[in-house]
Image (cartoon, rainbow, N blue to C red):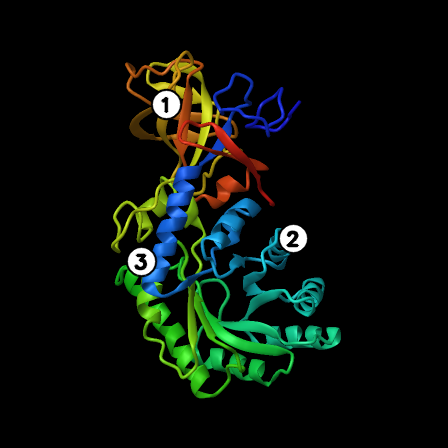
Amino acid sequence: MSTEKGVPFSRNPQDAWSIFDDDVAFPTVVLLDSALSHNVRVMAEYCASAEVSIAPHGKTTMTPRIFERQLEDGAWAITAASAWQAMRMREAGVNRVLIANQVVMPGELAWLAQAIDSGFNVYCYVDSVDGVEIMGAAMEQADVSSPLPVLLEVGVEGGRTGARTLEEALAVAEVADASPWLALTGTAGFEGIITATETATAGELVDAFLDRIVDVTHAVASNGWFDPTPEVIVTAGGSAYFDHVVDRFSYVDIPDPIRVVIRSGCYITHDDGGYDRSSPLGLTPRVAGERFIPAIEVWGPVLSRPEPGLVIVGVGKRDVTHDGLLPLAKKIRRRDGNGVITIEPIRVRALNDQHTYLDVDPAFGLRVGDLVGFGISHPCLTFDKWRSMSVVDDGYNVIEVADTGF
């Protein structure tokens, strides 16, 4: 008997079942297989036409089965945010991981050294002389057989990691180049935290930041500080501005072969919130091609109609993202019905730990026991609330149960 939320109480979840079977525990989360396949194909076609690679940010899903799908459809690598995530990815069979962060702790560096010596392809960032020295010392102590590939990270004022100026970046690059234990193989940045100001749009500021990465790349190359490598990696591009990355990085002009790598993680599930509004292939697309389709839904039962215009649904902060736009009610299934009905979307008013507040017209025919399907915003924080997710066909029959690895 299962005790896992979202799967049948009384059967093996590997047996054939539908999320609407009587013995399924709610709330439950589903990934629509057709939408996943569509989004992976659309992104692959976009990357091919733009002549860039993708290393999707695995922290979005931390789901080995999704890593497999992304790699099967041509992903160059999977991106991690930490050494721990990289370990989990390697355990899941991923052969190339880009750690989009600094790694400075002794145990993590020892693991990196061991991983490199065993043939694992792993990269990480550097943004300070201190970081270079810490990493170099750890690799020397481990006596690695080949140097650790690192990318020089450029950052934004007031933001997270990354060298803030060209001068700071070049100081780091020079020290990294001098280390026999590190191999400077590219440049990197993350534009997703940039927001508009009173004098400039977010897009304008993103472009200016990406241009700085291009300038740093040119300066490092002109000094001969990229280690001998088959290609120099130049990477940025979250889920909102990867089209800007493709545009601005097209101006990289160095003698070495280059590989432009975007790192969008949310494209595979997309969403019904922030990314649908901001993605180049979302609600208002900025590039030609098919749009992404939301692939993730969370379903819960109507628990109460305590007031004429208020519906309380059994879904809460423990089940869905709540750090941006709240969930969007978009489908219902009557307690005595067989089909799913698409409704005019209703944005949730509020969430408690286990309850959703849905404001409706008093005449709206939702009853206690009906099921409501919600689209979500920001997939990352929905994935990490579930130990497993049901991948379903368009009839909500379960194809497989994909375990997460948080």
Q: Residues within 10 Å of mark 2 (few under 14, many from 20)?
A: few
- Which residue is most to the top? 336
Vertical position of residue 160 compared to residue 223: above or below: above
Q: What's the residue type where badge 2 is placed?
A: Glu
Q: Quadrant of residue 347?
A: top left
Labels 2 & 3 near each other (Cβ < 8 A): no
Vertical position of residue 78 compared to residue 162: above or below: above
Q: Nearer the viewer, mark 3 or mark 1?
A: 1
Please tell me which of labels 3 and 1 falls first in the chain. Answer: 3
- The residue tagged 2 is 91
- The residue tagged 1 is 340
Number of numbered markers: 3
Residue at 59% in and 66% down: 121
Q: In the rendered structure, find residue 196 and report the number of the disc placed on it.
A: 3
Relative image position of residue 354 (x, y in whole percent): 51, 27
Taking 122 as reference, is 303 left or right?
A: left
Q: What's the residue type where badge 3 is placed?
A: Ala
Labels 3 & 1 near each other (Cβ < 8 A): no
